[in-house]
C-alpha cells in the first residue's frame, strides 16, 4: 500500500454501526501539512507504525469512547496531538507511545479526561508542551521515579516536557 499524500485535512471514521470493532493500521505514512481527525466506534484502535508529516492529530469521541491510539514508530506523531474526552469527563481515547521519539520534540500533547490512565509511555520521548484537561503542565520529566508520576500516566518510559527554550 502506498503512502497517503494529503491534499487537505483528513477525517478517519472507525465505524458507527453494529459491525465488529475495527483496528486500523497505518504503516506506510500519512504525509501533508494538514490535520488528521480520527473518530469512530467505541473500543477501536488507530495504529501509526510509520513516520508521518501531518501537522496535527485529533482523536475525537463524537461516535464512541475508549479509542486506542498507538504510536509504534519514531516520528509517527509528527505534529501536535489532541486526545479529547467524552461529555462525562471519562476518557474517550487513550494514547500509547510505543517507540522512542514517536512524537516531535516541538509538539504539544493535549489530553482530556478523568478517572483513568490517559497516557502510556513505554519508550522515552520528548515534547515541547503538555496539557491535561486544558491546564499546561510543568516543564519536567514524567514517569516512575521522575519529577512527576501522576495517576493519568503509566508505562516504563520517561516523557520529558521541555517547554520554551531558555535564552
Image (spheres, rainbow, N blue to C red):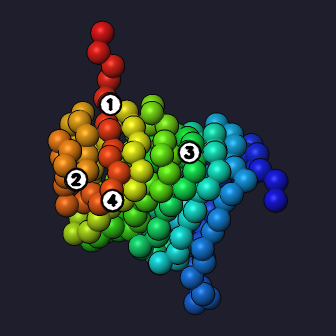
Earlier sequence position, callout 1 versus callout 3: 3
What residue does disc 4 label? 155
In the depicted structure, whether residue 89 falls above or below residue 135 = below
Q: CA distance from mark 2 to mark 1?
A: 18 Å
Query: Taking 40 as reference, is 135 left or right?
Result: left
Q: Earlier in the sequence, mark 4 or mark 2?
A: 2
Is disc 4 surrounded by few (<14), some (14 to 19) or many (20+) residues within 10 Å?
some
Q: Name the residue at the right extreme.
A: 2
Of pointers 1 and 4, the one earlier in the residue sequence: 4
Q: Are marks 1 and 3 in contact (CB under 8 Å)?
A: no
Up/down of 28 relative to 7, above or below: below
Q: Is residue 110 above or below residue 138?
A: below
* Comes first in the chain, label 2 or label 1: 2
Viewer-nearest of discs 1 and 3: 3
Image quadrant assignment for residue 96 = bottom left
**The label number, if any, that marks residue 37 in the structure image:** none
User: Marks 1/4: CA distance?
Assistant: 19 Å
Q: Residue at x 60, y 74 (%)?
A: 23
| Dot 4: element | loop
Residue under pointer 1: 162
Mark 3 — residue? Answer: 74
Residue 1, visible in the rendered structure: yes
Q: Residues within 10 Å of mark 3 (few under 14, many from 20)?
A: many
User: Is residue 8 shown left or right of residue 56?
Assistant: right
Q: Count the numbered circles shown.
A: 4
Location of the N terminus by quadrant is bottom right
Q: Would you name the residue on which mark 2 appears?
A: 144
Label 4 to label 3, Cα distance in Å? 17 Å
Dot 3: what SS?
loop
Q: Residue 48 location, x and y as percent?
A: 59, 57
Q: Quadrant of residue 167 in the image?
A: top left
Amino acid at each position: 500500500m502506498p503512502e497517503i499524500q494529503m491534499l487537505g485535512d483528513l477525517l478517519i471514521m472507525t465505524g458507527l454501526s453494529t459491525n465488529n470493532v475495527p483496528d486500523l493500521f497505518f504503516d506506510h505514512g500519512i504525509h501533508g501539512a494538514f490535520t488528521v481527525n480520527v473518530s469512530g466506534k467505541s473500543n477501536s484502535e488507530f495504529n501509526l507504525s510509520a513516520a508521518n508529516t501531518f501537522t496535527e492529530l485529533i482523536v475525537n469521541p463524537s461516535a464512541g469512547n475508549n479509542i486506542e491510539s498507538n504510536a509504534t514508530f519514531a516520528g509517527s506523531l509528527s505534529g501536535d496531538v489532541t486526545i479529547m474526552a467524552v461529555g462525562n469527563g471519562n476518557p474517550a481515547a487513550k494514547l500509547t507511545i510505543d517507540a522512542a521519539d514517536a512524537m516531535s520534540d516541538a509538539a504539544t500533547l493535549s489530553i482530556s479526561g478523568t478517572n483513568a490512565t490517559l497516557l502510556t509511555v513505554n519508550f522515552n520521548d520528548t515534547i515541547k508542551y503538555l496539557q491535561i484537561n486544558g491546564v499546561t503542565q510543568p516543564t519536567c520529566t514524567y514517569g516512575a521515579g521522575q519529577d512527576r508520576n501522576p495517576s493519568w500516566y503509566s508505562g516504563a518510559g520517561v516523557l520529558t516536557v521541555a517547554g520554551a527554550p531558555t535564552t
